[in-house]
Image: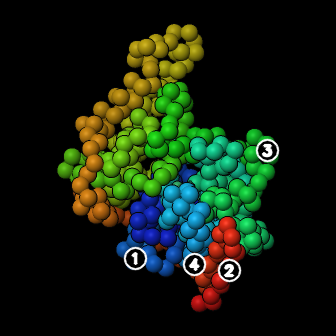
């Protein structure tokens, strides 16, 4: 039995994120399989793209909490379908898995996550005694899956999505010990209004996984092919979030094998190479700090390095909102505007497996618990 990275896309929209995640995993030089769970409503074009970027596609049926009340409190009415994540526990062909939200992006190899046990995750930035369910280590098990569904029917989720449910189900996470608590660099949230820029400047070079948490995702911004610039719909978050948005788009546009790498992570779009270089430069200079010859106010400040990176990657700092028309129709895929990528497209065909033929609606609101299961 092997180990795998697992993600989920129930819509063409989220599949955009999954494509970038799949490419970033390959670039990280992972030795593990990459597996994407998909639902039947994805377009055939979307499936073709996913097949290029993931080792395996697995058809699953959506699960939805339909918990309007709690999702309204979370202010994310669209997240009822995140109960579909629970299906990941049915992937018992794998011994251990790491789940990654489709809105995450891997910057450095994270295969060491497979040394962790279920359930390992990083603290949520909104409530750090809860874990964020955008990145977690788990062990597929039919028994756990059944228990999770039972729990969903009886108790429900306090946020209407998977995170509330999983935090109650794995309720001892916060006290279980540090091996279950992933460092924040494995799930670094870049684009929310609360952020901690000084800490990013101190530790940012260690970031392994970026999570674009929130309703506005990088693919909702507008990317101008002629200039290679990102026009963001919203501002806020870390100073570096523009850099990550640009890296997301450059990887989205990358075609062929140019983003793939065996180990070093020194390939791919220019913005990704720049990021690696800035990290290395910063790490070297930090040694200088530690030897007692720091230049905290001068060139050794990580924010200076960041500004330099930004100037290399984003030619202007234009973050004005894009027009509605351009943002509603981001190009699905294109080969234009990339100088660092090859024009060849390699198609790795993914195995598609159907694991479930059951449609399940789970509803456990504050007042009622109702379950509807329909055999297809
Ligand atoms: N997701 C999906 N379809 C949806 C909503 C969510 O496939 O309509 C999946 C996707 O993998 C996504 C995850 O569920 O990354 C969690 O949703 P999201 O990342 O938007 O939540 P956030 O991290 O912003 O709270
Ligand atoms: C969180 C997580 C996300 C989850 C959502 C709903 O913010 O980032 O992965 O799906 O809450 O519970
Ligand atoms: Mn997410």
Quarter occupied by residue 235: top left
In this rendering, which labeled residue sits more in front, label 4 or label 1?
Answer: 4
Residues at marks 4 and 3 touching, judged by CB atoms closer than 8 Å: no
Instruction: Give the left or right position of residue 43, taking residue 287 as reference.
Output: left
Residue 247 horizontal/vertical position (percent): 38, 46
Residues at marks 1 and 3 touching, judged by CB atoms closer than 8 Å: no
How far is disc 4 from disc 1 in space, using C-alphas? 15 Å
Question: Earlier along the polypeptide chain: callout 4 or callout 1?
Answer: 1
How far is disc 2 from disc 3 in space, using C-alphas? 32 Å
User: Residue, x 39% and y 77% (percent of image)?
Assistant: 44
Q: Which residue is mark 2?
A: 371
User: Residue, x 60% and y 62% (percent of image)?
Assistant: 70
Q: Which residue is mark 4?
A: 61
- Disc number at residue 164? none
- Disc number at residue 175? 3
The relative height of residue 25 versus residue 315 in the rendered view (above or below) is: below
Residues at marks 2 and 4 touching, judged by CB atoms closer than 8 Å: no
In this rendering, which labeled residue sits more in front, label 2 or label 1?
Answer: 2
């Amino acid at each position: 039995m092997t180990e795998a990275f697992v993600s989920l896309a129930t819509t063409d929209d989220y599949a955009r994120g999954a494509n970038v995640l799949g490419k970033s995993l390959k670039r990280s030089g992972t030795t593990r399989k990459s597996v994407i769970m998909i639902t039947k409503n994805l377009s055939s074009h979307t499936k073709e793209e996913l097949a290029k970027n993931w080792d395996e596609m697995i058809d699953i049926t959506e699960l939805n909490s339909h918990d309007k009340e709690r999702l309204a409190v979370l202010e994310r009415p669209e997240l009822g379908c995140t109960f579909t994540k629970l299906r990941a526990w049915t992937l018992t062909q794998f011994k251990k898995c790491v789940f990654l939200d489709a809105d995450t992006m891997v910057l450095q190899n994270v295969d060491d996550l497979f040394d962790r046990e279920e359930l390992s995750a990083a603290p949520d930035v909104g409530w750090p005694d809860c874990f964020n369910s955008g990145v977690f280590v788990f062990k597929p098990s039919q028994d756990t899956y059944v228990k999770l569904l039972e729990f969903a029917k009886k108790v429900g989720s306090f946020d209407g999505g998977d995170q509330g449910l999983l935090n109650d189900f794995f309720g001892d996470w916060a006290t279980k010990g540090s091996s279950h608590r992933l460092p924040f660099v494995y799930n670094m949230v870049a684009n929310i209004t609360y952020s901690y820029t000084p800490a990013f400047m101190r530790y940012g070079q260690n970031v392994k996984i970026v999570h674009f948490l929130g309703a506005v995702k990088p693919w909702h911004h507008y990317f101008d092919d002629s200039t290679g610039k990102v026009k963001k719909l919203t501002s806020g978050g870390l100073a570096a979030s523009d850099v990550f948005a640009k890296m997301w788009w450059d990887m989205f546009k990358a075609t062929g094998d140019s983003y793939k790498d065996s180990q070093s992570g020194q390939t791919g779009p220019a913005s990704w190479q720049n990021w690696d270089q800035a990290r290395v430069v910063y790490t070297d200079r930090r040694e200088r700090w530690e030897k007692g010859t720091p230049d905290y106010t001068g060139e050794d400040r990580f924010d200076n390095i960041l500004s330099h990176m930004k100037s290399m990657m984003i030619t202007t700092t234009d973050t004005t909102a894009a027009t509605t028309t351009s943002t509603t129709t981001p190009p699905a895929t294109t080969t234009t505007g990339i100088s660092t990528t090859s024009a060849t497209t390699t198609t790795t065909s993914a195995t598609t497996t159907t694991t479930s033929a059951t449609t399940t609606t789970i509803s456990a609101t504050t007042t009622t618990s109702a379950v509807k299961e329909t055999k297809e």
